[in-house]
Amino acid sequence: MVGVPKPMGAQQGPWLSDVWPAPGWEPGGHGRGAGGAARSPSVLPSWALLAKKGYQEQDPDPQVSVITKLKGVSVTQIEELGNRLWDVADFVKPPQGENVFFLVTNFLVTPEQVQGRCPEHPSIPLANCWADQDCPEGETGTHSHGIKTGQCVVFNGTHRTCEIRGWCPVESGAVPVKPLLLQAENFTLFIKNTVTFSKFNFSKSNALDTQDPTYFKLCRYDPRSSPACPVFRIGDLVAAAGGVFEDLALLGGAVGVHIRWDCDLDSGSADCRPQYSFQLQERSYNFRTATHWWESSGVEARSLLKLYGIRFDILVTGRAGKFGLIPTLISLGTGAAWLGVITFLCDLLLLYVDGEAHFYWRSKYEEAKAPKRTAHPEQTELVPAPPRPAFQGP
């Protein structure tokens, strides 16, 4: 007795090479689910071809150009600098407008430093001392402001520190208690981004092509009401990244701006728009800078600024797709190969693993019995035929 596959016209049970089993399926249901509709595994190549656009050639590496401009004015009133106005040249570093820039929101100033000898600040490690022996001459540390002279001197009424040779007076090491440029929340950031997909000779800018000269002065980006406007209010941008502007303005931070282009060139340039997303990367950021000049006495002097603020990192990525014959053929061939693999694997599961395997065996194969032999009680002896007479002519 041998199991052979049933012929094409024979009734077969629901095995997965024909249908996907649906919830509620029972033997005898001929591969129908509770809804009565069979679901074909051909959905896999269809998904790869249509949903994932397997019929398109791809260019995932565009050439990118980013130009940024920050606008705003702020006023500070502090003892060291007096009443001072801050504009773009003061609070944007670097000023040329790149894809990475720094917005100053707070600072500590140490004015009129000159090179000389002065006591180290007590907050510096190994700066406190009781005697000269505690201050080895020529020693310096990672956080020190200069080189030790070997003297232990009075810093104030409560501290004695090692004397150093460096820029004096030394930085105070104080921590700011409130942001000085809180008005920066209302500053605006203009981001002009152009992408070029050289494979398709296609370029697109995020700046709307408009004849209205006041458009970019009045519009503000909003993901719902104004998604095409490339002008961002700083406070809204920080909030979209998940931060609080007052906190970042105090001690600084870093915000990432991601511009994603996903272009379907089969639909023309209309289906090629940037998508913006924002992410808070750091909650503290600062650096130091100084302004140098020469005194009338010929001594070099400087004002040291410790700047706190928000660093903006603008990242641009994208891809463009356009119909191509070769990727279409590859996707179709891959889908056909997957159909064969799925059919084979599903047969293995249903015939050898499934709990109803015996049902599928009976449905897929039929028993083939050996043919019966006819019994002959007597054997007939075979008699050779007489020879054919020779042909004789007339």
Image (cartoon, rainbow, N blue to C red):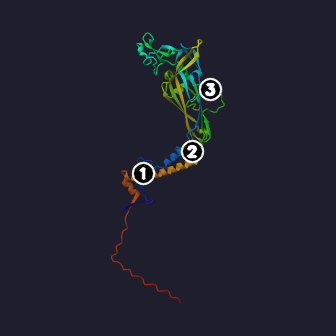
Nearest to N terminus: mark 3 or mark 2: 2
- Please name which of the two marks, 3 or 2, marks the residue nearer to the observer: 2
Q: Name the residue under label 2.
A: 57
Say whether residue 139 is left or right of residue 87.
left
Q: Is residue 249 above or below residue 271?
A: above
User: Label 2: how many residues lie within 10 Å, few (<14), some (14-19) or many (20+)?
Assistant: some
Q: SS class of the residue under badge 1?
A: helix
Q: Is residue 213 above or below residue 364?
A: above
**Labels in figure, total:** 3
Q: Mark 1 points at which residue?
A: 346
Residue 151 in the image: above or below residue 365: above
The amino acid pointed to by label 1 is Cys
**Does label 2 or label 1 sit earlier along the sequence?**
2
Q: How far apart are marks 1 and 3 (CA)?
A: 63 Å
User: Which residue is drawn at the image coordinates 60% and 37% (left, top)?
Assistant: 196
Is the Cβ of the residue at disc 2 closer than 8 Å to that at disc 1?
A: no
- 1 or 3: tag closer to the N-terminus: 3
Residue tagged by mark 3? Answer: 217
Q: Which residue lies furthest to the top in this view?
A: 157
Q: Residues within 10 Å of mark 1 (few under 14, many from 20)?
A: some
Question: Which of the two residues, 64 or 378, is positioned nearer the viewer here?
Answer: 64
Q: Front-most of 29 and 63?
A: 63
Residue 174 in view in this figure: no
Marks 3 and 2 sit apart, C-alpha to C-alpha, by 39 Å
Task: Please state which of the two labelled residues, at mark 2 or mark 1, is closer to the viewer.
Answer: 2
Residue 222 coordinates in the image, percent (x, y): 56, 30
Q: Which amino acid does label 2 sit on?
A: Glu
Note whether 36 is above or below 219 in the view shown. below
Q: Residue furthest left?
A: 377
Given the image, on which type of amino acid does mark 3 rest? Answer: Lys
